[in-house]
Amino acid sequence: MKMDGNIRVATEARYKELYNNMKSNGSVNDSHDLFFFCACIGYRNGSQVPIKKRDDRFWSRTITPREWACYYAMVLENNSFDYEKVADDKDVIAVIEGYANAGMNILIDSFLGDYLLPSSKSTDPQLDPGCCKELPKQFVHFIFEQSEPENLNI
Amino acid sequence: MTDNKTLLPDVNELIIEKLKTYPPNVRELAFQAIRLSESYPEVAVADQLQSVVRKLSKKQEGKD
Amino acid sequence: MILNKMMLENFRQFRGKQEIEFVSPTQGSASVTVIFGENGRGKTSLFRAIMFCLFGERRLSQDGDVKREELQLVNVSALEANPGQPIRTIVELEFTHREQTYRLRRAILGMQDGGRVIEEEDEKRLFITHADGNTQPIQTTDIEAVIDSILDRRVKDYFLFDGEKIERLTRASVEQRREISAGIRNLLNVDALETAIKAVGRLTKSLEKELTNSSHEDLSRLLKRLGDNEEEQGRSRNKLNQLADEIRLARQEIDKTDKELEKFNEIRHLLERRKALEHELHGQEQQAADALIEMRNLVCKATTLIVAPTVINVFSHIESQKQKGEIPSEIRRDLIERILSEKQCICGSEVCEGSETYSHIIDWLKRTKDVSTQDSALNLWRYLSEVRNHFSDDADLVEKRLQQYGNINSSIANINRSLENVSNQIGTSERQDATKLDEHRKKLQESIISLEANARVTQTGFEQFQQENDRLRALLKEEKLKVGLNDELSRRSILARDTQDALNDVYNQFTREIKTLIGESATQLFRELLDKDGRENLRTIIVNDDYSLQVLDRYKKPFLANISAGQRQIMSISFIAALAKTAAHGNKIEIPLFMDTPFGRLSYEHRQNLINQVPTFASQWILLATDTEFRRQEAQLLKNGGMWGKFYLLRSTIDGNTMIIDQDIDSAMAVLRDEEDYL
């Protein structure tokens, strides 16, 4: 659990354009934000999909300590709190990539699909620039739906 | 009846009165100019005044 | 000249035969005829009919650049009702002048030809009934001369006081000076003198050119300088005329735009409301954009809420390990390993394999993590603690931002609904051009300001050229004399120049005298028309050398810039009346005076003074008024003065024409409005 900054974090190659679109049109601040969001969705839904065709997306040094903490928590919880499983950051990232991949699939199925260029949905999905102004609000709304406020009373 | 030609002030009388203070040649040339202007346009009047001014000038020379 | 009556047949908006009888002082004491009607009913057309009948003229000075062909006189309905048939338009005027009664009739024939109307002169007849009762027909060829002897056509426009003319004279501008200069020139009737001055000037120029070519160097140089200077001055004069024309056209364009804008007045408040709504919408859209940015930033923080259960779970686990002493371990792992390998406790006791103590120590070993793992776990615990502490705030923020964005969107939707509502009320896209017309008008006003500034500069330049001309002429005269009286060409040139100066002197003297006369006459009337406060301070109207008007205060200082709009209007009226008096050559104006909506911006006292004073200097007053100008208050004033004799109402008919309705004065009061009707 060293929060290694020298790891290349990858996504499914077909999501390369989508990640780039989201960044460039201001739907997300940075790729690691979107990756974190997808990873949380994937983990929350108990879904992990191994990457078929890897494509490096960003360096792990952009991952914030809060995000790392959540990643470690996910891996620990899923492995009966075996600290061995979180000893190597590369292994942690490999697991989280699977959750992120699943999370992106869930996202597209939920609402993101409506914001994609129809012709690109089956191949390399791309954002329709004409109608993605409100995506940040859609993300926040999704967070609101996915989280359980009653469990947050500490 | 209000005479169209003599609306206030009486132009002809004023011309005569005012020009009295000028030398005879000037008076004569002025009267000729006004008289011709009653019937002819500007260019024609200027042309005709050429001979008038020549005559008056020669008359002046004879007197000198 | 006193008008008795006028008959119109198919003239402009007056369809069929209609008649007006004018009140005349010859019939009693009354001299005021009121013709009452809204704008466009034909008040000015009545004056136009008189001018057409007297002089065969269609154009009035207010028509500006409108072409003669566009001033149609034949009634449109009559033409349309009789397609292919010629329609006769007739104006017949009966008036009295110096105990003789004149009956003048003028007619034109109008006919539709494709899309346009052709009008041709038809008949022209004049009969004079003398004091002895004998009636004499006048030859058609002599009619013009007879009429001109009664009223010079050049001054006819001074007997129509229309609101626009009054307004023009209130402005200190090139246009005002031109108007006054033209008025004075017309009064003087010095055509021959003006032609003579120009002719002698031409002669002088030609002689001086000859002299330049054949003479003395110094003389030649002076002549050239004078020639160049006169040319520059000529260019200045042309520029001034051009600027005056441009200003006049811009003003006409503004008037035209105002007439267009009047149509939009009813929707002006809607246009303003729409503008306000659009501004508000823009603000809300801006807020929406900002809200989206905030939400984008929130996504990073709030995503942890999705895995909150995991965070809490892991945090709790590490917390419990801490409490159990596992993290950090109460006994270090390397120490336990040493105990196991040496099979000896730190207290010295033996630790045998298989013993209970040995099992406990093995369990400890299993539970104990290595140092780096313990450190990492502790760090993780700290980060998870921080994430966990923010859950509540982050959840609140998510809810708040979503609500805020929802509110903004609602607001936007409401504004859009209101905008749609307002736009529907505004109507067609043509009417939405009111804003464009407004902008066009503003640009025209700006251009007028710029042109007037340019004209002032050019005027200064023109005056400087004049001064230089005078100086050069004086030098030239000296030089010519030096060259020698024996030089005949030189003599001729001097004679021509002297004569030109003499004629200019005479002309200037005339105009000075007439300006003084008009100024005195205007001042007298001005002080009678002003209210009490105005009389206190405003003393004299003068016509300046440059033909601009000025008002002097009690200290004889120029005060025009400080007088009110109403006082300016009184000044204009006084000036026009003074011109009319001078043109009529007497203390009382023996020509009928038409005043078209003269009350405009006048206060009640000013109106009162005007109503009381005009009948004292005009033998016959025809007042053309609208409902906002002539109310019960003004009618009562007229009635009290005993000068009001006739009231005609111009009423529009279904087919867009006008009927002249003769109403007695008492029932006229019922038609008129009170001041309260406007509050």
Image (tube, coloured by chain):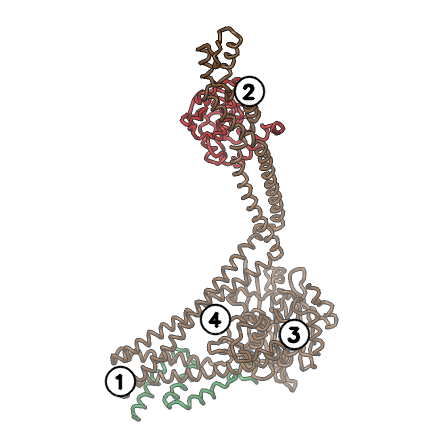
User: From mark 3 to mark 1, how far is it between C-alphas?
Assistant: 68 Å
Give how far across and how far down residue C12 sits, in percent: 60, 66
Q: Residue at x 65, y 60 (%)?
A: C655
Label 1, residues with CA under 10 Å away: few <14, some 14-19, many ≥20: some
Any part of residue C147 in sight: no
Choose mark 1 or mark 4, whichever is in front.
Answer: 4
Mark 3: secondary structure: helix
Q: Colour of chain C?
A: brown
What residue is shown with label 2?
Answer: C324
User: From mark 3 to mark 4, how far is it between C-alphas?
Assistant: 31 Å
Callout 1 and callout 4 share a chain: yes
Chain of the residue on which disc 1 is drawn: C
What residue is shown with label 3?
Answer: C605
Chain of the residue on which disc 3 is drawn: C
Q: Which mark is residue C174?
A: 4
Could you say which chain is coloured green in the image? Answer: B
What residue is shown with label 1?
Answer: C483
Give how far across and how far down residue B30 sits, in percent: 40, 85
Nearer the observer, A143 or C497 = A143
